[in-house]
C-alpha cells in the first residue's frame, strides 16, 4: 500500500482518537534516489489542521548525498493524489550546502511521482541561494538565484553533477541566476546570467592565473552526449589575467567583451571555438575560430583570426610584447593601426595577410626605428610565393637616419627576399641593396643575407649623426654578402670603406649576437694611405701632415668594447707627401707613449717653431687583459721611436718609454688629446 494512502486512511479514520502519529518507514529506494532511516510524524491540531515532520538520515541521488534531513510543515495538506506543504522549514547539510531552518515548500503527486520543491535562503557554497526544483519521471529542473556563491566550491558541485571544468584552483564570488535541466544521466542543460567579483584562478605550474576579475556573463550550455555546446557572452572590466606569457589588465577604459559559440569535449579536454567575436578596447576587435587542447599546458591546434582593426601601442603591449621578451623587439615604442588575417594549423602558423597603416616602431634604447610604415604583407606556408609591399617615411639604425623608401618582397614558406633592388637614402648618400633574403632554419632561428653598396656620404653628415667631432671627406664602400645565421653575422668578402682620402679594408668580420645585450666581434683590418692632415684636424689632435698605413689583427670586442688586438700604425715606406707635425701633436703623441716630454717644447728653444719636419712616425699596441704592450716604429735607447725626426734642423725625436700601459688609461689620454682646447700651435 502506498505511503500516501496509508497516511490518508490513518488521518481520516483516527482523527477523533489520535493526536500524534509516528511512522518508521526504514529505507525507501527508487531507480535514481534513496532515503535512509525515514521517519514520518503527523500531528492533528485544532481546527482540522495537520502538521507533518519528515526526518531522514540521508537522501542520495546520483553522486549527491544530503544528510540529517528534517522537513517540518506547519501547514500540511494530504489528499488521495498528492501531499503539499506551503509553510515549511528545512534542516539539511551536504558538502555543497547547509540549510538551517530554511523556508521551504513542496508538493508531491503519489500517482506520477512528480515533485516540486522550493528552498529559500539556503547556505550554498559559502553563499546563499533560493532554489526551485521540479522532478518527474527522472527528469529534473533547478532554477537558482545565487548570492555571493564561492566559485571554488561551486566548481566541485558542478563536477559531481557531471560538468567537468578545467582543473584549476578557483577563487572569488558569483551572483545571478542559473537554470539547470537534467535527468538520471546527469546535467543536460545550463542557462545563466551571472556577475562575479574578486574572481581568480591558478594552476599548479603557475602558468595560468587571474586575480580580482570583475566579470559579467550570460549564456547557455547544452549537452550533446559527448560534448557541451556553449553560447555565451563575457565582459571583463576589472582585474588581471595571466596565461603564459600573456598578461592582461582590465579597467573602465580598457575592457574586454567576448561573444562566443563553443564546443567543450570533456573526455579529451578539447575546446572548439566555433565563433568568437572580441572587442578589446584600445587594443583590437575582430573574430576568431579555432581549437584549444588542454593538458599540462594549453596548446593551440587551430586558429582562424580576423582582425577588423587593431591599435598600437595597445596591441603590442597586451598581445605581442610578451612573446617577444627574448628578442630585439622586446622594448618598442609603437603607434599606428592594422587589419588582417592570421591562420594556424597543427600548432604552427599557416598563413598571414596584414595591412599596416602609419605604423611607428622604435626601440626604446635607440637601436633602430621606422616611422610612417604602410605595408601589405602576405605569406602562405602552402603556396609557392606571395608578394608583399612596404613603404616608410623614415628609419634609423642607431643614429644613422634613413630616408623615405619602399620595397617589394617575395615571400615563400620559410623565407622572403627582395623582388627587385632597393635604394634607400642614407644621410646625403644612398644605400643600394642589390640582394636581401631572410629565412628560418630547421631550428626556428632567423637567418638573412644582404649584398649592396653605399654611395659617398659626407663624413661631416656621418659624424654629425653619430655625435662625433666634425669629420671631413667622404664615406663609401662595398657591403659584400653580409650573412646572419645561427645568431652570428659574417661578411663573405672584404668590406671596403673609403674615408679620410684613404681605404679601410675589414676582413674576417663576424659578430655574435649583434643585436643582443653583449655582442662579440672578431675582425682584421687594414688601413691604407689615410690623410693625416684631414684626420688630425677633425679630432683636434694637433696638425700632422702625411699619410698613414696600419694593421689591426685579431681584433676581439665584447659589448662593442675592445678586449684584444694586435695593432700597428705608421708612415708608409713609399710616402712622398709633405711630413710636418705641430707642437700640440708632438705633446699628444708623447703623452700616449709615456715619453714624459709633454710640455717640454714650450720650455725650450724649440718653442719658437710652430711645426717640425719628421721622417716617419708610428705606434704599436698589443692588447691583452686590459693592458697594451707598447711599441713604435723602431727601437731607441731605453725605449722606442714614436716620431723620428729628419737629419735637417729643427730635428725632433719623440721616444716612448712605457712598455705596458693600462688600456683604459690610454683611451682616456686619447680622448683628452682629441678634445678641442685653446692652443697657439695646432
Image: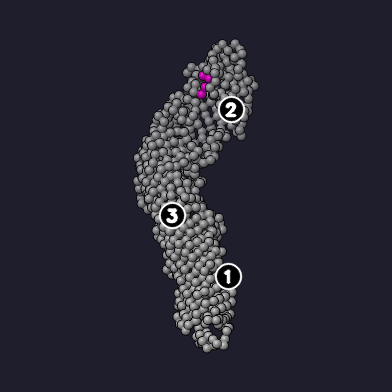
Outermost residue toward the front in this view: 47
* Disc on res. 356: none
- Name the residue at 48% across, 72% down: 133
**Eyeballing the image, is 320 above or below 406?**
below
Front residue of 628/331: it is 331
Q: Residue 248's spot in the image, x, y percent?
A: 49, 51
- Name the residue at 55% across, 27% down: 568
Q: Which residue is mark 3?
A: 257
Q: Residue 72's spot in the image, x, y percent?
A: 55, 76
**Eyeballing the image, is 81 above or below 233?**
below
In terms of secondary structure, what is the magenta stretch mainly?
loop
Distance Cα–Cα, label 1 vs label 2: 85 Å
Residue 202 appears in view: yes
Query: What span is in magenta?
Result: 539-543
* Disc on res. 668: 2
**Eyeballing the image, is 495 above or below 415?**
above
**Eyeballing the image, is 381 above or below 556?**
below
Specify whether residue 541 is painted magenta.
Answer: yes
* Disc on res. 100: 1
Q: Residue 389's spot in the image, x, y percent?
A: 36, 43
Q: Nearer the viewer, mark 2 or mark 3?
A: 3
- Name the residue at 41% across, 32% down: 426
Q: Residue 59's spot in the image, x, y percent?
A: 55, 75
Q: Residues within 10 Å of mark 3 (few under 14, many from 20)?
A: some
What SS does tag 3 mark? strand
Q: Tell me which label, 2 or 3, sits earlier in the chain.
A: 3
Distance Cα–Cα, label 2 vs label 3: 60 Å
Amino acid at each position: 500500500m502506498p505511503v500516501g494512502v496509508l497516511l490518508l486512511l490513518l488521518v481520516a479514520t483516527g482523527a477523533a482518537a489520535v493526536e500524534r502519529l509516528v511512522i518508521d518507514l526504514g529505507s525507501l529506494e527508487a531507480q535514481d534516489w534513496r532515503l535512509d532511516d525515514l521517519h514520518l510524524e503527523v500531528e492533528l491540531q485544532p481546527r482540522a489542521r495537520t502538521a507533518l515532520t519528515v526526518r531522514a538520515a540521508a537522501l542520495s541521488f546520483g553522486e549527491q548525498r544530503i544528510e540529517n534531513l528534517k522537513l517540518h510543515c506547519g501547514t500540511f495538506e494530504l489528499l488521495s493524489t498528492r501531499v503539499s506543504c506551503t509553510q515549511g522549514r528545512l534542516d539539511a547539510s551536504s558538502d555543497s550546502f547547509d540549510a538551517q531552518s530554511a523556508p521551504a515548500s513542496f508538493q508531491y503527486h503519489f500517482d506520477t511521482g512528480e515533485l516540486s520543491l522550493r528552498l529559500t535562503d539556503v547556505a550554498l557554497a559559502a553563499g546563499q541561494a533560493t532554489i526551485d526544483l521540479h522532478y518527474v519521471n527522472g527528469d529534473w529542473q533547478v532554477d537558482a538565484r545565487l548570492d555571493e556563491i564561492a566559485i571554488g566550491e561551486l566548481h566541485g558541485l558542478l563536477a559531481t553533477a557531471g560538468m567537468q571544468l578545467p582543473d584549476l584552483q578557483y577563487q572569488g564570488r558569483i551572483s545571478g541566476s542559473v537554470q539547470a535541466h537534467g535527468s538520471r544521466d546527469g546535467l543536460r542543460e545550463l542557462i545563466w546570467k551571472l556577475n562575479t567579483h574578486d574572481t581568480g584562478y591558478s594552476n599548479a605550474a603557475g602558468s595560468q592565473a587571474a586575480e580580482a576579475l570583475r566579470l559579467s556573463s550570460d549564456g547557455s550550455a547544452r549537452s550533446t552526449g559527448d560534448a557541451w555546446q556553449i553560447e555565451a557572452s563575457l565582459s571583463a572590466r576589472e582585474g588581471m589575467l595571466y596565461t603564459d606569457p600573456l598578461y592582461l589588465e582590465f579597467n573602465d577604459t580598457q575592457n574586454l567583451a567576448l561573444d562566443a559559440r563553443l564546443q567543450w569535449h570533456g573526455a579529451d579536454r578539447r575546446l572548439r571555438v566555433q565563433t568568437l567575436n572580441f572587442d578589446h578596447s584600445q587594443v583590437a576587435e575582430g573574430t576568431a575560430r579555432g581549437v584549444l587542447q588542454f593538458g599540462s599546458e594549453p596548446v593551440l591546434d587551430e586558429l582562424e583570426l580576423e582582425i577588423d582593426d587593431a591599435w598600437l601601442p595597445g596591441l603590442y603591449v597586451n598581445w605581442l610584447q610578451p612573446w617577444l621578451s627574448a628578442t630585439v623587439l622586446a622594448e618598442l615604442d609603437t603607434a599606428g593601426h592594422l587589419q588582417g588575417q592570421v591562420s594556424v594549423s597543427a600548432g604552427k602558423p599557416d598563413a598571414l595577410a596584414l595591412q599596416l597603416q602609419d605604423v611607428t616602431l622604435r626601440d626604446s634604447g635607440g637601436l633602430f626605428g621606422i616611422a610612417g610604415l604602410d605595408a601589405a604583407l602576405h605569406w602562405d606556408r602552402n603556396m609557392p610565393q606571395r608578394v608583399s609591399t612596404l613603404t616608410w617615411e623614415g628609419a634609423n639604425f642607431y643614429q644613422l637616419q634613413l630616408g623615405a623608401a619602399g620595397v617589394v618582397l617575395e615571400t615563400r614558406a620559410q623565407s622572403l627576399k627582395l623582388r627587385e633592388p632597393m635604394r634607400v637614402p642614407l644621410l646625403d648618400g644612398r644605400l643600394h641593396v642589390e640582394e636581401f633574403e631572410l629565412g628560418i632554419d630547421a631550428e626556428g632561428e632567423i637567418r638573412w643575407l644582404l649584398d649592396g653598396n653605399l654611395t659617398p656620404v659626407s663624413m661631416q653628415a656621418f659624424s654629425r649623426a653619430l655625435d662625433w667631432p666634425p669629420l671631413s671627406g667622404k664615406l663609401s664602400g662595398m657591403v659584400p654578402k653580409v650573412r646572419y645565421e645561427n645568431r652570428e653575422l659574417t661578411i663573405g668578402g672584404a668590406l671596403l670603406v673609403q674615408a679620410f682620402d684613404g681605404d679601410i679594408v675589414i676582413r674576417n668580420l663576424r659578430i655574435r649576437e649583434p643585436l643582443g645585450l653583449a655582442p662579440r666581434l672578431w675582425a682584421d683590418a687594414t688601413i691604407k694611405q689615410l690623410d693625416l692632415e684631414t684626420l688630425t684636424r677633425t679630432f683636434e689632435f694637433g696638425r700632422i701632415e702625411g699619410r698613414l698605413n696600419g694593421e689591426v689583427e685579431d681584433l676581439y670586442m665584447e659589448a662593442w668594447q675592445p678586449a684584444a688586438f694586435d695593432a700597428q700604425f705608421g708612415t708608409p715606406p713609399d710616402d712622398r707627401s709633405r711630413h710636418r707635425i705641430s707642437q700640440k701633436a708632438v705633446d699628444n703623441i708623447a703623452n700616449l707613449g709615456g715619453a714624459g716630454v709633454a710640455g717640454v717644447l714650450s720650455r725650450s728653444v724649440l718653442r719658437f717653431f710652430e711645426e717640425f719636419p719628421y721622417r716617419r712616425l708610428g705606434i704599436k699596441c698589443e692588447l691583452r687583459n686590459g693592458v697594451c704592450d707598447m711599441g713604435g716604429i723602431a727601437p731607441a735607447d731605453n725605449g722606442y721611436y714614436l716620431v723620428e725626426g729628419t737629419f735637417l734642423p729643427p730635428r725632433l725625436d719623440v721616444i716612448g718609454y712605457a712598455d705596458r700601459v693600462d688600456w683604459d688609461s690610454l683611451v682616456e689620454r686619447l680622448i683628452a688629446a682629441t678634445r678641442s682646447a685653446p692652443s697657439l700651435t695646432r
